[in-house]
């Protein structure tokens, strides 16, 4: 990948997502180490879990509405509790 070093060494969390036909995220394709730290899981674990499994119901609703309006950034709360 041409930009792999930028992706891996970024100081911000980067999430590469697969979108469904409604452009709603369904799974993680790749994440960098900052994203792993932020979510508190290994890269392997994150890639094996649905994006929505990380979010409480109220945040899922907010993100679904954002994507329906054409916004492309996910809203993640600072802390995600399970």
Image: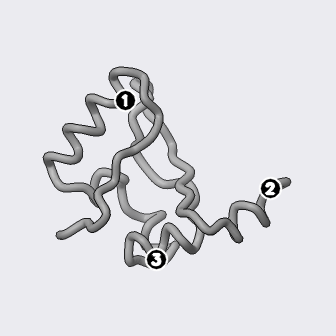
Taking the image as shown, residue 69 lies to the left or right of residue 30, namely: left
Q: Residues within 10 Å of mark 1 (few under 14, many from 20)?
A: some
Relative to 13, say whether 71 is above or below: above
Quadrant for the N terminus in the image = bottom right
Rendering coords of residue 72 (x, y %): 47, 34
User: Which of 18 and 58 lies nearest the eye of the viewer?
Assistant: 58
Distance CA(mark 2)–CA(mark 3): 21 Å
Q: Are marks 1 and 2 in contact (CB under 8 Å)?
A: no
Residue sitting farthest toward the top? 69
- In the rendered image, which residue does mark 1 sit on? 67
- In the rendered image, which residue does mark 3 sit on? 37
Rendering coords of residue 80 (x, y %): 25, 66
Relative to 33, say whether 27 is above or below: above
Rendering coords of residue 5 (x, y %): 79, 66
Indicate the quadrant where residue 21 lies: top left
Q: Which mark is residue 10?
A: none
Q: Residues within 10 Å of mark 3 (few under 14, many from 20)?
A: few
User: Which of 4 and 38 lies nearest the eye of the viewer?
Assistant: 38
Q: Of marks 3 and 1, which one's residue comes earlier in the chain?
A: 3
Element assignment for label 2: loop
Q: Are marks 3 and 1 in contact (CB under 8 Å)?
A: no
Residue sitting farthest toward the left? 58
Q: Which mark is residue 3?
A: 2
């Amino acid at each position: 990948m041409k930009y792999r070093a930028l992706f891996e060494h970024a100081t911000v969390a980067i999430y590469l997502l697969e979108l469904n036909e409604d452009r709603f995220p369904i799974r993680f394709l790749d994440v960098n180490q900052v994203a792993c730290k932020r979510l508190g899981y290994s890269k392997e674990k994150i890639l094996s879990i649905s994006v929505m499994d990380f979010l409480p119901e109220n945040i899922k609703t907010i993100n679904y509405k954002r994507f329906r309006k054409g916004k492309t950034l996910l809203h993640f709360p600072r802390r995600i509790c399970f």
